Image (cartoon, grey):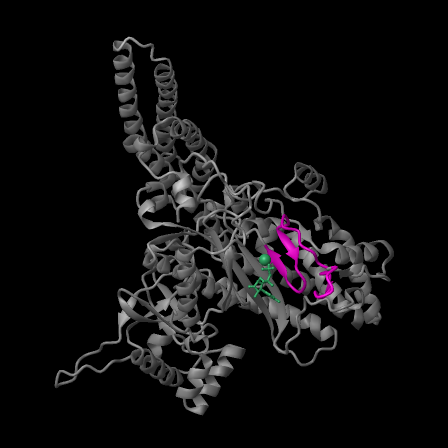
Amino acid sequence: MSEMINVEELFASRVFTLGKMKEKLPMQVFAEVRRVMEQGGELPLATADVVARAMKDWAVENGATHYTHWFQPLTGITAEKHDAFVSHPDSEGRMLLEFSGKELIKGEPDASSFPSGGLRATFEARGYTAWDMTSPAFLKEDATGVILCIPTAFCSYTGEALDKKTPLLRSMEAISQQALRIVRLFGDTEATRVVASVGAEQEYFLVDREKYLQREDLIFAGRTLFGAPAPKGQELEDHYFGTIRERIGAYMKDLNIELWKLGVTAKTQHNEAAPAQHELAPIYESANIAVDHNQLVMETMKKVAGRHGLTCLLHEKPFAGVNGSGKHDNWSLCTDSGMNLLDPGDTPNANVQFLLVLACIMKAVDTHADLLRQSASDVGNDHRLGANEAPPAIISMFLGEQLDDVVKQLVETGEAAHLIEGGKLETGVSTLPDFKKDATDRNRTSPFAFTGNKFEFRTVGSADSIASPNTTLNAIVAEAFCEAADTLEREVAEGKDFELAVHDLIKEYMGRHQRIIFNGDGYSEEWVREAQRRGLPNIRSMVEAAGTLTTDKAIRLFEKFGIFTRVELKSREEILYETYAKTINIEALTMINMANKKYIPAVVSYTKSLADTVIAVRGAGVDPVVQTELLREVNLQLTAAKKALKELERATAQAGDIKGVKAQAFFYKDTVKEAMDALRIPVDALEMLVDKKVWPVPSYGELIFEV
Ligand code: ADP
Ligand code: MG
């Protein structure tokens, strides 16, 4: 029997929860903390001192020696700088551990080594971290000991956001304010906030650590840059939801325990479509916490893998020819009084508030499809989007048969008089119940699908932070809500009947933005042509998407709601180009390195042994037909590989000389990447020809089937 896991006891045991605060803080102080958490504002320093002391005592009781302001710079991962709780020893040499309110609330890490996209040139290098009270502090344990982590926002000296959290928090304010205007119009006087709620399903691969360590491409690029396909891929579909192997099971168990301790509601786990691919989903929560927790999920996945002799690959496309990994970002809007604005109820056609919300989302997604596409782009995701396995790069919305029909009726007649019933699914077995069919049946090829009471944004990459997609979603929908509320408030003030005004607005929005709805096969060639006819953007790569951040339309949107300034947007665009160029450069150098030091030497000595064989066989008086033919084929591919290698070396050197980050990023995409693909072809061909014993790295088969 394995040991009992007490989830209730484990859950959030490493988190300074509201419950713990309530227990450890004087009532007055706790009330103040709660008020600031809910309504914003600043905690007076005296109060912060009390909170800091309680937090430190709890952390120290649980073994902590250090604290850190935990933040999310534009690298897409988290950053931390540890400070011990130590202070000056007293006159007798005793150590009194200290942690002040000031240290809790504000930190001052040197910002100069984080990407700032030009902000640094114009402003000071100083950066500040500020405690985000809406996300609880937690304890992280690793080889350095136990560290108290305080989630913070990270800004420059002059207040520019240098992180992913600050704009996200700003966008949550915006959507809350604008959504409140909508629910007020429908007579809700109770709600005081509307919370963007997010549940992120995380896909990942696990490979054997020993094998991983033999491949520089996995080490430096997080993906294989070479590799012939294994005889078997995912075509039998025997991995999806398949029985979880012992070693993976032990990993998942350990992972769940670590996540539960951190207050992450790890809920669902299963094998994914590709061999060695798996998924974990937590229960949804406020977008801000969901973003923090997704970072913890990714970090913990990697950390726990090490304990099991495994390595976790979060890259969007670790292996060519089998599915890549994404992150389904489930998003909805809930009032603090418990109403989900995206819940259609039993009669969506009669639920006018829902229809208005839906119309606004259609308008938002259609107007800013380019921004939504951008928000989910990163270097790795370029391999997935539009490659017939992940959502297409074209953004569209899937509503399901029932809602689609409601929209059509509204657009055509201004009324949705009838409703396609979900219908019953008859099992035909008397001992099994019949099910009510889900009216929003699934379309896996849609990038943005309505799934019952939420939208599922499926374009997001597995390695990327979910901050940008949710910031963008909140922003674009806030804008649509704002415009709708402006119109309705004005028309009602002018004496128009509210019902009629809403009705007209829904019809107008749905009619104008119906082109964004697509229920067909998003992977098909026809859709690419159809989308073009409809005028929907088809942005094929990350570098092409980056510019969408600084169009007049985008600047107007983000500045209007105080989410990004023009300068912040410009800096983010620059960082994207830099990141792209640097990443492809690393990949190119890794390929050059592997080709020069591993593949070519291995094949050269193989040709030597083949040549020796040819001579020996001929010497024995037999014609070495096969040996000669093989030698010739191998030599042909070897020549091609060497030529392609030279080309890649030349392109990579040339890339370094290009002036301007944007031009450089495009050169990497158009020229260096092409040269990389060209080198891969002969090397993969050689892998199929050459004796397995001399191949210098583990094969695809060994990596994905022997975990
Ligand atoms: P799937 O069939 O796509 O796996 P699930 O119902 O299991 O759908 O949900 C997947 C994710 O969506 C989970 O993280 C879940 O908590 C989250 N989710 C469910 N309802 C909502 C909601 N109203 N808002 C945001 N996320 C939600
Ligand atoms: Mg899902």
Is 90 left or right of 644, judged from the image as shown? left
Task: Name the residue at 35% across, 24% down.
Answer: 642
Q: Where is residue 485 in the image (x, y as percent from the top left)?
A: 71, 67
Front-most of 189 and 18?
18
Is residue 455 within the magenta segment?
yes
Give the mark count. 0
Task: Name the residue at 37% across, 31% down.
Answer: 654
Q: In this view, does 351 lie above or below 30?
A: above
Classify the position of the N terminus by image quarter. Answer: bottom left
Task: Name the residue at 43% across, 38% down.
Answer: 664
The image quarter containing residue 613 is top left
Is 613 left or right of 512, judged from the image as shown? left
Q: Position of residue 252 (x, y in %)?
A: 43, 61
Taking the image as drawn, is residue 124 in sight?
no
Q: In this view, does 239 lie above or below 619?
A: below
* Region rendered in magenta: 428-457
Front-most of 114 and 455?
455
Is 380 left or right of 485, judged from the image as shown? left
